[in-house]
Amino acid sequence: MGKKAEAKKELILDAAKSVFGKLGYSKATLDDIAHAIGLKKPTLYYYYKSKEVLFIEAFSQEWKDSLYRIKKIAEQERDPRERLLLYIRSSLRYYQEIVTQHTISIQVLIETRIMFQELFKESRAKETNFYASVIKEGIANGTFLDCEAERVGYSIMVVKDLIQFEEFQRAQFHNLPSIDFEKIEREVLYTVNLILEGIRVRA
């Protein structure tokens, strides 16, 4: 893609952030975004095939930056177990904030899950590596038993993801008005605690 096309994409992304910020995901349309920068909708489709793709890409860097800040804050916690739980709790609450702020529907959360995972493949790998590095530190200082830290870290990441998705599906199946994010947090932290308890060194 040439410089002119890249500049046009940046213009579209900036407009999308502004429109999504004002109207929220559910109410914003591609027509609204195209109108904001004087484009016709077919031109917008040349760069972005759907509102979902545009939304995720528009905020992807912001999300990545926020998760990096959450990680830096968590790193101030000296206890490895508490550091892991702080990061997980904070990242879950940030995700809830994004979903609530932009009034993203349950249907969209389910439909965009694979797309979201693909776009954030690098971030998800970094998340797993973060978990593994904290576990390795815990092994070194006697908090955790010697174990395969990478596998445990990956398991924590998968558990977090699957519990969220299961709750999305439950809410959709029962036609609930919103996601119970407090339940997600409780279940994720409970399950992660079970994993960490399994590798904890007993006095």
Image: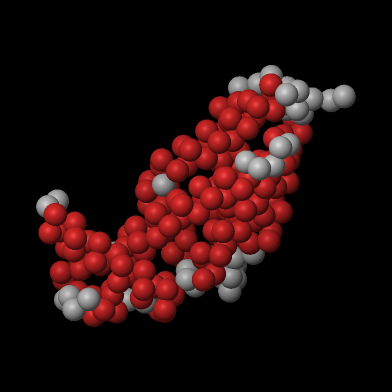
Say left or right for 137 vs 50. right
Q: Residue at x 62, y 53 (%)?
A: 90
Q: Residue at x 51, y 64 (%)?
A: 98
Q: How is the image coloured?
A: secondary structure
Q: Quadrant of residue 81?
A: top right
Q: How many marks?
A: 0
Where residue 91 appears, as percent x and y from the top left, is 58, 52
Residue 44 image-quadrant placement: bottom left
Residue farthest toward the front in the current orientation of the protein:
76
Q: Residue at x 57, y 50 (%)?
A: 70
Quadrant (top left, top right, bottom left, bottom right) of the C terminus: top right
**In x, y percent, where is residue 42?**
16, 71
Name the side, left or right, on which 95 lies relative to 56.
right
- Residue 115 visible in image: yes
From this view, report whether residue 112 is shown above or below residue 192: below
Residue 88: x and y in percent read: 62, 47
